[in-house]
Structure formats: structure tokens, C-alpha cells
Amino acid sequence: MAKNFSAIPPEARRTPEHFTLRIPDQDIIDFRNLLKLSRIGPETYYNRQENGQFGLLRKWLVQAKDALLKSDWRSVEDRINKFPNFTSHVNKPQGGSVVIHFIALFSNMPSAKPVIWLHGWPGSFLEFLPILDLLMTKYTPDTLPYHVVVPSLPGFGLSDDVCPVDAEPDIDTAAAILHELMLDLGFGGGYVASGGDIGSIIAKNMSHRAECKAVHVNLMLSAPTDPEIKAEYYSSPGESEHLQSPLALLAWMGEKYQEWVDPRHPLSLESILDVVSFYWLTSSFPRSVYPYRRHATNTGMLGMSKDTPFGYSYFSREVAFLPKKWIEENYPKLVFYRAHDKGGHFAAFEQPESFLNDLEDFLRSVSS
């Protein structure tokens, strides 16, 4: 069924290559061996507290490690590969090109609206797979009203790093590359950008391009002032020193995928383990931890265009929140606002039905 959504638009100025994910066997063996040999520390008063006051529960880590050792990575690959995957050489603003991976559902409708969905950190395109499932159930290639493009952000997952190791990447470069990707796919007549977390910051940056006709986000940040928020949400350079083993990565990411979601509707353990495995096997953490986070902390709203139609979906357990009145006062082009009583930081992953409904309503609002 997914292959029916893989017809590249005839207007594309560069033809992407079809891609199938296949991690080398030895990488998977090494991953399991390292995980198996990693020891979990002893039980203490602090790692027994159920309220999360002192971080991750030891019993969760024991359970998660055991489940991860028994997990089948090839089944994760099968799920990813059931969607149309592509890679494309995209020109960089400073010259040269970079290989960007993306999943796409292309429509056969001439009037289909192009949309790019941008994941966050520590996230990946895996967050959007449940929504892609919903779209493939709801529509056929002949009725899908959108061209949906879901990339691995530069420096994440299956995409190349933006810059060589002797230069530091930044939000501007990432946004320029993803904008160029949309033009390469034939969407120079206009597209919509949607994102969460770092993806929301990139989408706002893209709003300054004439071809970006509207932006939808599920995270709004002003410059962070609360020291506790800074400490919890933004990583520090020293953090990566503790992420030299699969078990450490499991503990660090496992906490985020529990603490930043709505505890009334938690993600499944399997979903969390899939993301952790993907991050380790693609070396995503060391490639993505620094540049975007540094710019997020230092750049506030990052110059969102006030002339571009704008939509905001707020999920009640998100890590940060800005009132609607403040947004309206600062962004007169706010055309869509919706608050949800459930869902958290990984909204597309946690509440795919609500997230998709918001996106479709927003797209209708900017098309009318």
C-alpha cells in the first residue's frame, strides 16, 4: 500500500533515491553486547521513589534493559521500510551538498498541499509514523489532499551532518537545507511547515521564505528565564560524557520519554525502546546534542515572520507554555489556536489522532 504513495511529483527538479534501512548485523551485535555487559547500579532510596523527584526508577531501567535485549530490531526496520523512504542530495547555502533522508506520502491530486513535518530532540521521524498510518488508512493516493514530507533533521538519524567536523552547524543552515529540499521536490509554489521542539524553531525560521506559506507548531518558547526550566530542558556540554553506553542512553532518553509526556497516557515501553535503539544505531545523540540546543537557548523566538499565517496547538503536559493572548499580541497572523487537555512534549507520538486533526483543521484554515 505504501508504494502507492511513492510517486514523486512531476514538478520535482531533482529526483530523490528510494531508500531501504538496513543496519549492519555487526552493529546490532555490538549494541546488544554492550548493553548486556552494562551494569545497573544498586537499589537506593532515591531510585525507588515513584514520584520521579529523583529521576528514573531503577525497576523501570531493569525492565527496560531486559526488554531491549529481547527486542527485534529488524521488526523496527520492517515498520520503517513499509513507508516510502527516500534520500536526496540537497544543496547547502555555503556550497556543496548534504544527503537528507525523508519519508513521504505523495498524492496524485494536482491540488495537493505540500507539508513538511519536523521532529524534535531527542526525537526522530519515528514520532510521525502513527500519523502516517492514519493518513494511509483515511486516504488513497488519489484522495490524499497533501504531499507529506517527514525528514530526518540534518545531523539526526539517517540524514548527514550539516557541516564538516571543523565547522559548527546552526538553525539557519538546517532551515535553508530543508527549504531547499521542498523546492527540489517541486513545491516552489508554496508549502506549509509544521514542527515541535527544535522542529518548531526550524519551521519558524523557514517562515521567512516566500515559498513557506504557513507555519504550525506545538511548542512556543520565549527566552528561558526560570533556572529550573533551563536545567531540566536544555542540555549542557558535560551531559554527553555520561552517554557512552547503550544503558546510559536508555536511562537518559527513557527519563525524557516518561517525564515529558502526559503520565495519564504514557508511551508504550516498546515505542521508547525503538527510539533508543534508533538513536544508538544511527549515532544520533553525539551528532545532534549540541548545535540546535545551543541556538534554542540563546535565540528566543528566533525571528518568526509576523507576515506568515501561524497556528499553535498546545498540549497540556508540554514542558513550556505561552498564553494565547501573548501570542496574539506578538503574532497578528495567528489563525489557529487549540488547547488540549491531554498530551505532552511528544504530541504527535502521544496523541496522533488529535495532532492530525489539528493539522488538517489548520491547513483548511489557511486555504480558505
Image: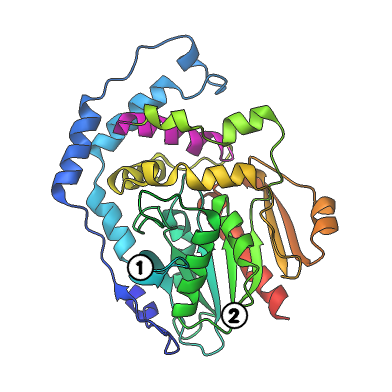
| Quadrant showing the N terminus | bottom left
Q: In the image, is residue 71 above or below residue 140?
A: above
Three-letter code for the amino acid on which mark 1 is drawn: Phe
Three-letter code for the amino acid on which mark 2 is drawn: Gly
Image position, residue 142 (x, y; %): 46, 86
Instruction: Find the residue positioned furthest to the top.
Output: 45
Magenta residues? 244-262
Q: In the image, is residue 88 above or below residue 50?
A: below
Q: Which mark is residue 83?
A: 1
CA separation in Å, label 2 and label 1: 24 Å
Residue that carries the numbered disc 2 in the rendered image: 190
- Residue 69 or 96: which is nearer the viewer? 96
Residue neighbourhood size for the residue with mark 1, other residues' Cα within 10 Å, grouped as few (<14), some (14–19), many (≥20)? many
Discs 2, 1 touching: Cβ within 8 Å = no
- Residue 144 or 255: which is nearer the viewer? 255
From the viewer's perspective, is the residue at label 2 or at label 1 nearer?
2
